[in-house]
Each structure stands twice: as C-alpha cells, then as structure tokens.
Image: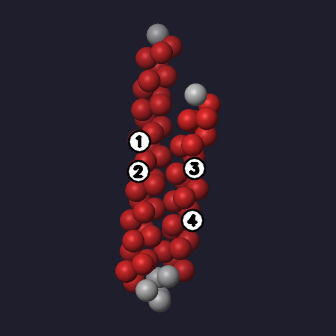
C-alpha cells in the first residue's frame, strides 16, 4: 500500500515537468504549450483524485 501512496506524488512530478515544458514552448509553438498545460492539469487532477480515493478506502479499512 505504501507503493501506491508514493505513485500519487509521481503525478505532481509530471505536472511540474509539463508546466515547465508549456512555459518553455509558450512563445515558440502555441499548440504544444496548450497540450502541455492540459496534461499538467490532468496530472494535478489525478493526484487529488487518487489521494481522495486512497483516503476513502483507508478509512473504510480502519473501521
């Protein structure tokens, strides 16, 4: 179960990478920058989604 807790933070790592890629391509290629920002938003959403359900199932197993 600790491994799954670690992998939720991998989503934040990828979000930072996509945000950096989007900022670096903002002036050059607008479409690539937009796609990078969309992937960053998706990665942040997945972080919170996975964290919510990990806490939900953890609370259910504790009781």
Q: Which residue is mark 4?
A: 17
Residue 53 placement, left or right of 13: left
Q: Which residue is mark 1?
A: 49
Give residue 14's mark: none
Label 4: element kind: helix
Is there a contact, CB below 8 Å, between mark 1 and mark 3?
no
Q: Position of residue 58 (x, y in %)?
A: 49, 22
Q: Earlier in the sequence, mark 4 or mark 3?
A: 3
Q: Earlier in the sequence, mark 4 or mark 1?
A: 4
Residue, x 41% and y 41% (percent of image)? 49
Tell me the distance, in whole angstroms, between the alpha carbons under discs 1 and 2.
6 Å
Q: Position of residue 32 (x, y in %)?
A: 42, 78
Tell me the distance, in whole angstroms, between the alpha carbons under discs 3 and 2.
12 Å
Residue, x 51% and y 77% (percent of image)? 23
Residue 14 placement, left or right of 57: right
User: Few, some or many C-alpha atoms within 10 Å of disc 3 (few <14, some 14-19, many ≥20)?
Assistant: few
Q: Which residue is mark 2?
A: 45
Tell me the distance, in whole angstroms, between the alpha carbons under discs 4 and 3.
11 Å
Residue, x 39% and y 83% (percent of image)? 30
Of the 4 image quadrants, the one containing the N terminus is top right
52 shown above or below 47: above
Q: Position of residue 63 (x, y in %)?
A: 47, 10
Tell me the distance, in whole angstroms, between the alpha carbons under discs 1 and 3.
13 Å
29 shown above or below 34: below
Q: Earlier in the sequence, mark 3 or mark 2?
A: 3
Q: Which residue is mark 3?
A: 10
User: Few, some or many C-alpha atoms within 10 Å of disc 1 (few <14, some 14-19, many ≥20)?
Assistant: few
Q: Nearer the viewer, mark 1 or mark 3?
A: 3
Q: Position of residue 31 (x, y in %)?
A: 37, 80
Q: Earlier in the sequence, mark 2 or mark 4?
A: 4
Label 2: element kind: helix
């Amino acid at each position: 179960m600790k491994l799954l807790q670690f992998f939720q933070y991998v989503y934040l790592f990828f979000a930072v990478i996509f945000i950096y890629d989007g900022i670096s391509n903002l002036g050059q290629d607008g479409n690539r920058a937009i796609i990078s920002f969309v992937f960053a938003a998706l990665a942040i959403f997945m972080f919170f989604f996975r964290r919510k359900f990990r806490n939900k199932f953890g609370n259910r197993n504790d009781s």
